[in-house]
Each structure stands twice: as C-alpha cells, then as structure tokens.
Amino acid sequence: MTRVRSLFWRWVALAILAAGAYATVVRFTRGLGAATNLSDQMPWGLWIGFDVLCGVGLAAGGFAITTAVHILHLEKLRPIVRPAVLTAFLGYLLVILALIYDLGRPWNIWRATVLWNPRSVMFEVAWCVMLYTTVLAVEFSPLLFDKLGWRRASRAARAAIVPLAAAGFILSTMHQSSLGSLYLIVPSKMHPLWYSPLLPWLFWLSAVGAGLAMVIFESGMSARAFGRALELDVLEKLARAMAVLLGVFWFLRLWDLGVRGHLGAALRLWGPGSLPARMLWLEALLMLVPAALGLSDRFRLHPQRLFALASTVVAGFLVHRLDVSTTALAAGSRYFPSWMEIAVTMMLVTLGVAAFRFAVLHLAVFGPAHGAQEIEEAKLAPALYG
Amino acid sequence: MRALLIDVTRCAGCGACVEACCEANHLPVTDSAELGPYHYTVVRKVRTRRGEIHYRRLCMHCLDPACASVCPVGALKKTRQGPVVYNPSICMGCRYCLQACPFEVPRYEWDSIAPKLGKCSFCAERLAAGGMTACAEACPTGATLCGERDELLKEARARIAAEPGKYLPRIYGEREVGGTSVLYISNVPFAMLDLPENLPTEPLPSLTHRALSQIPPLIGTAGMLLAGLWWLTDRKREVARAEGAVRKQEGKR
C-alpha cells in the first residue's frame, strides 16, 4: 500500500517537473510575455508574490529558532534547529532560483554588488538575500562536513555559531521587513486595507509567526514521511509563540485600519467591490482562529490538531501575502497567473521537498547531537530547564 | 531645470508630436492610444461637455522620481537638466520601476528575452545640445511648450489668470508627488485626462526613506540587545551549572 502511494507521488512529482521544464524553456527562449500573464500594469505576479514573498516569509522559522537556541540558550528547542536551518537554507536557494526566472535580465543580477543605490528597498533586499544565504550556508555546513569527515572545518563552522546567529537575526529582520517596505512607495495604487506605513513591521511579525507554523508543519510532514516521533514538547512551545505573534500582528493591523479610518472599508462585505474586505477576513479567519485555538492545551498538545492548526496558519499567510502582491493592487484583481507561472512555482516547491528529503536521508538533520559541546549541553539541558 | 507645459485647451489632436517623437527616437509611427515600449507619447481623445478634448500622455519626469529611487542599480536617473533617463546595459529587469511609477508610464518589452524599458527620455540629448524636445518643436498650436520650469509655471499662471472661466485654477504637476517636469493646464478635470488625483504632494521616495533611515539605529540596538541577552542567559546557565556541582558534592558528603 505504501509502495503504491509512494509510486503515485513519484509520478506526480515527475509530471510537475516536466511541466516546469517546458515552462522554463518557454520563459528563457521566448521571454516573460510568452510564459506569464504579467503586464505593464501588473509587473509582479506569482513568482514574486508566492515564490519570493511567501518563500522568504516561511523561511523565518530558521532565524527565529537559531536565535532562540544560540542567543537565548533555550536548549529545549535544540533538536529542531537543524531542520529549521535546512528549511531556511533551501527556501533562500529557491528564492534566488525564482528571481532568475522573474528578472528580465538576470545576467545583470551581480551588478547590485557594485552599483549601489541605497535609496532603493530593492537594493537592501538584494544585499540581505546574498548575505543571509551565506550565513545559512555556513550554519548548515557542519552537517555536510561531518558527513565528509572534515572535522576541523566542522569545528570551525560550529565555533562561529553565536556571531552567525546574531548576524542571521539582524539580516533576517532587515530582509523580512524590507519585503513590506517595497510597497511603501505605492500609496496611490494599493488598496487601503493593505497599504500601511506599518508594512515593514507587519511583514516581520507575520513572517515569524507563520515561519514557526511552517516549522511545525514540516516536522509533522517529516514525522509521517520518515516514521519519526513528533517532538510535541518542543513544537507546542513554538505554537504558543506563534499564537502570540499572530495576535500582535492582527491587533496592530486592525488598530492601524481604525486609526487611518478604513475599518468601514473592511466591513463592506457585500455588493460590488467587496472582494478586498472578504479577502481580509479570510486572512483573519485562517490566521486568528488557529492562533486562538493554539492557546488551549487541548489543541496544542494533540499531534493531529497541532498539525492542522499550523497548516491553517500557513495557508492564511499565503493568502495574506498573495493579497498584498495581487489583490491589493489596482490591476491585481484582474491578474491570474498563467499555467506556466504555476508550473514553475510547483516545480520549485517540488525541488525543495526533494532536496529536503535527500538531505534528511543522507545527513544528520534529525540525527543525534554531534560534537562534544553539544552532547554536554544536551545532558545539562534537562537539569536547567526541565 | 527644463520642463514641458501641456495646454490641453490648445491641443488639436493632430498627432504631430507623436510623429516627431517616433522620428527622433527611430521608432515605428503608430496611432496607438496606449503608451508602449515603442510609443513614448500618445494623443488620446475624450468626449466631454465641452466637446471633444485631445490630450497627450508621456513620462512626467518627476522632480524626485519614484522609479529612479527604487532602481537597485541606478539604471534610471534624474539628470540636472530635468530628464529621467534609462540605461538598459545595467538594468537587471526587476521591474520595480513599473510597480513604483504613480503614472503607470514605464512600459516593458515583454516579448523580448533581453527586455528593456520603454519611456520618454525628454529628448535628453537634444536638451543637452541646447535644443528643445522634438514634440514641442513640432507642435503647431503651442499646446506643448518646452522651457525652464519656473518660466512655464509663470506662463501657465498667466494663461489661467487671463481666462479664469476657461481654465481650471490649478497646474497639474506643480505639486503632485513633489512636482513634475511635465505640467498640465486644462479646462476639464484632470482625472478625465487619466491623471491620478489621489497623489500626495510629498515626493514618494520620502515614504521609503522614512523606513530605510530606521535601519542603522535598528542594527545597533539589535546587536547590543542580542549581545546582552546572550551574556545574560549564558551567565544564568553557568550559575545553574555551578550550583549543580555544589549540590552534587554536598550529596556525596
């Protein structure tokens, strides 16, 4: 039975990769116009809205957990540092890949390193992507070095973890917030239910909240796939943090709508032009309900329910970011991605899942703690925090 | 700084400006009503209570252009003389300029595999050589004037003052998004000319600047906070470890 199921998924993955490969050829031989539904009025579509805005956001669990363990010494979270860093690292690699599809002249991508325009948010974004991907690569490298038996390199990379974690926190904070800042310059084009001077802060909050949900989601998926036990005692702590962060996010958002006098627009749920308000409340429903339920032990301490809560939050987050990048923009409600845009996005997600699986099968992602220091700390941890 | 004054009431819709523009930029002549990667200016008409009105659209050449401020590599620049010019050789094609422009002016070569931006360059080379734009030179009715921005503002005010019943008492582009180098005066509401009426008077780049200027202090604060928290939690752990050792010894005794 499991064999049949795994065979089925293998065929699905192959079909997605084939469609993605075809779309890739069209994109790079006939241009963005032939492959996408983008237009002068809607210059950013699914590849920016989903692959970049959602991809980076959901990778936020990586820096959040790294900071918690290596800066705040929350030893209990240590078992999930590696999967979270792996997720973030793969996420960033996929974002870069997606950018190569989306940029009209990707061969000029390196120019941002020499031609500086510090007034541009995109310039900040470009530098954050480059630097934080490097940080993630070094944070992830010990797993590879251990596999190769390069002890000294592994030890060197581990020794740098505290400053790396600090750099990761700062770069991620800048990157997550700057994705929101990208939209600060379009006040006249963006719907008031999404435009806000608080966009950078809102993007940071929603990313960390949903990033933690993503870690729970992934732990659940990989527990099922690899037959591991779920680290419920760890994940329930993440769910608690997630609930608080999403609560603050929605409080700020609704408060901001009130202050700017747009709560009325948020309540226009029927009649023509009610799509934005409906989407807003769909986002709220998908994020706030699981966040609230996550505060109750009956849901948080139950593996299936916890998994369902996290999945719903991730879905709500996707809706929210797609709203910001499409629904909220004047031409956005008329844009729908072409099948080739969808195929490339699905291909990138499939590649990410495959790479994650490959890494788990060949590297000690979920394995026992390596290195004398970590073992010692693992022994100490229960005495301290248990 | 050079500017253009477009007096909608004088435009006959002859299209001489479009032809001159295409010729000066070596582009195919079309009568398209939409700006495009190969149409830097267009003449449109709209039926109003005052009869049929013709009006031009082209890049507004903002004084503090959003497109130039958002370009990560500086492929778009506002020159001292006024034009906002584009350098395709360094452009990476992120299209943030298309997203940021409040007038929806920049157009993209979507069908190219090395796409470039298409938009009016304000005939930057002709201006630098002391000339005026091809469109202004070609205009037979004086509906498009090329000159110094201050002078054109004066001229616009004089025209409005001379015929207050005809013109709306406002110059579009004088204050919008901090001012533009293309100015409009009209006898019908500017919204009818597809000019957005919901723009702030403050330059759009200042909206981003407010957020970006918070970053350096944020880095400093975050760095200190992280160091402090690391030290504090590390110390807590050491104390716990020492206490644990003491307890162990006492247990042995």
Image (spheres, helix red, strand yellow):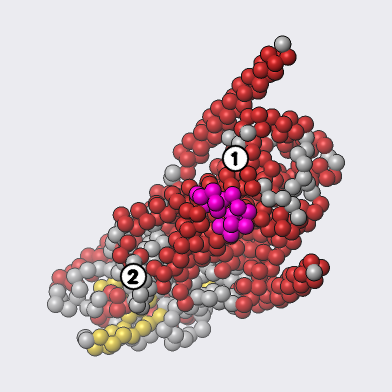
Percent of width and height locating residue B222: 51, 37
The amino acid on which the numbered mark 2 sits, given as a three-letter code, is Arg
Which residue carries the number 2 mark? A268
Q: Residue at x 25, y 76 (%)?
A: B189
- Pinpoint residue A174: horizontal percent, then vertical percent: 52, 47
Dot 1 lies on which element? helix
Tell me: residue A16, above or below residue A220.
below
> Mark 1: few, some, or many residues within 10 Å (few <14, many ≥20)?
many
Magenta segment's dominant SS is: helix
In the rendered structure, does residue A296 fall within the stretch colored magenta? yes
Query: What residue type is disc 1 on?
Result: Thr
Q: State the residue in front, A287 or A161.
A: A287
Secondary structure state at the residue bearing disc 2: loop
Q: Earlier in the sequence, mark 1 or mark 2?
A: 1
- For this view, does B61 lie left or right of residue A30? left
Same subunit under labels 1 and 2?
yes
Q: Which residues are magenta?
A: A294-309
Report which residue position mark 1 lands on: A67
